[in-house]
Image (spheres, grey):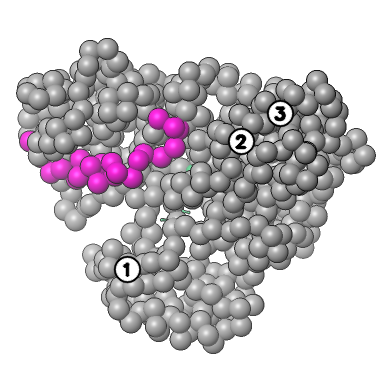
Amino acid sequence: MNKNLSFSVHPLTSCPLKSFPYTSDISSLPGVKLSYGTAGFRADASILSSTVYRVGILAALRSLKTQSVIGLMITASHNKVSDNGVKIADPSGGMLSQNWEPFADTLANAPTPQDLIQLIEEFVKKEDISFNGVRPAEVLLGRDTRPSGDALLKAAKEGITSIVGAVATDMGILTTPQLHWMVRARNKGMKASEQDYFEQLSSSFRCLMDLIPSEKSKFNGTNDRLVVDGANGVGGIKLEALQKLLSGLIIEVRNDGENGGVLNEGVGADFVQKEKVVPYGFGSKDVGIRCASLDGDADRLVYFSVLPEGSSRIALVDGDKILSLFALFIREQLSILNEQDLKNSHQAHLGIVQTAYANGASTNYLKQLGLEVNFTPTGVKYLHEKAAEFDIGIYFEANGHGTILFSESLVGWLEARTKELSSKSKGSEVEKAALRLLAVSKLINQAVGDALSGLLLVEVILQHMGWSIHRWNELYHDLPSRQLKVKVADRTAVITANAETVVVSPPGLQEVVNAEIVKYPQGRCFVRPSGTEDVVRVYAEASTQEAADSLANSVAKLVDQFLGSKTS
Ligand code: NG1
Ligand code: ZN
């Protein structure tokens, strides 16, 4: 294939590609079909350069279309170290607009350079994308610590700069949420360097620490100590840098990738949440200590404590419990404002967003608090979109990805109100509640779930409440659950509805699943195709672990019967 296929200026858009250096690799493999899915494109790193190059083109076109800075992150998150992946951050810092996903899919799967060029020409015309000579495309690039990141970065840069005038700015090795934060900050005209990120997080953390009621017992002894499993990835390194700016908290980072540990191997939030055992480097010496685990690109966070039995078992404090802690704190501050502030013209609406993977006990708990709980399909893009409908929207996946979104109008109101109160009722409870909410809006990443900012918020709320991890974990007791993967011939044959809780195709499958569920007290079970792996996932919950296991196993068998085993 022609490695340097020259490409002429598009007659309508003047949007030329200078060259086409990457012949298709992954897209020419038989049977491989890439899908942008819930987390961008992921595959073995050795076959990904043409995909990353193409996503570079897409990012530059997206920048021209939106006349904004776009982000391109090279990471495969919690996947194994030999994998890599690529995803786009939109101008808001959020995920790529869903409208562009079909284009991303066809671009990634174009079988030949000619097809690719034709696709781009058609898309550029349809979307009316042009370079006006004033604002060229600009794409911020980030990558995690994977060894393949460097070569893929080069492919991304070539893709971006194949669009005339486009600028690729390498932001270095970053966590995924840092890159999203930077894109958002740049487009808001705010300072957007890594140092600015660290300063915003540490100063809002300090502000929240200063607002802890004096009568609440502050941490003492071992309680101000946190041990973090960095998954041998980028998160641990960044946390070590960030903690230099923090006081009132002692963080020990393990698995920071320095001592020969392998990324995500027996470590990290995904491992800890799925296996419910200690990650490498943790053990009986840590019984009673508050521990946390990040995933490979630090957009997921779970907490745990090592159980005393001398085994490797842990008490897991997952994303649902982080959400519950955040919800309690936000609700407390909002009720002070809503009830005590007579000038409060802004009765803020708090909404919670979960997926079907949220443990049923967490949903019950949140509902008992009187909170509105909404459900969306799996994938943070859906949760984020729903949470953005509220004045304050809190979303979390059980796996530890989530954040708190504040509407611009609420932040504006809080800014004005805190100024007013600082002159008239300084030190009042109302002023403190407003200041706390404002500080949370600055601490917690508004673009995407961020393990580092989430961790700081958990820490300050525990101090605010005077709670140990055990007290926190006692908020409610998780229902026993089991997740299974079923390899089938074609997972896309499973079509779901109602936030993935009901299978509508193949016909008849949901009916037999329902017939299983009713056999189990507190039984709940659903089936959906994974967006990141070639499997169908089964999730089951019931009153005992044996029952949850049995329900999951029977449903997995039904899935297998309806869809047939995978033939390779
Ligand atoms: P899939 O493979 O679509 O289930 C997984 C996670 C999602 C999300 C994405 C992106 C589970 C059950 N699913 O998606 O929550 O985090 O990966 O990383 O954990
Ligand atoms: Zn991740």
**Mark 1 vs ligand 1: CB below 8 Å:** no
Q: Quadrant of residue 81?
A: top left
Q: Earlier in the sequence, mark 2 or mark 1?
A: 2
- Residue type at numbered disc 2: Leu
Report crowding for label 2: few under 14, some 14 to 19, many 20 or more residues within 10 A (C-alpha).
many
Which quadrant holds the C terminus? bottom left
Q: Does 160 sit above or below residue 512? A: above
**140 sits left or right of 196 in the view:** left
Residue extending farthest to the top is 134
**Mark 2 vs ligand 1: CB below 8 Å:** no
Residue 85 at x, y percent in the picture: 36, 40
The residue under the point 80% across, 20% down is 423
**317 sits left or right of 248 in the view:** left
Q: Which mark is residue 417?
A: 3
Callout 2 secondary element: helix
Q: Which mark is residue 410?
A: 2
Report crowding for label 3: few under 14, some 14 to 19, many 20 or more residues within 10 A (C-alpha).
some
Callout 3 secondary element: helix
Q: Which mark is residue 178?
A: none
Residue extending farthest to the right is 215
How far apart are the alpha carbons under marks 3 and 2? Answer: 10 Å
How far apart are the alpha carbons under marks 2 and 1? Answer: 41 Å
- Residue type at numbered disc 3: Arg
Which quadrant holds the N terminus? top left
- The residue segment tinted magenta is 91-114
How far apart are the alpha carbons under marks 1 and 3? Answer: 50 Å
- Residue type at numbered disc 1: Val
Q: Which mark is residue 494?
A: 1
User: Is residue 8 at least partly visible in the picture?
Assistant: yes
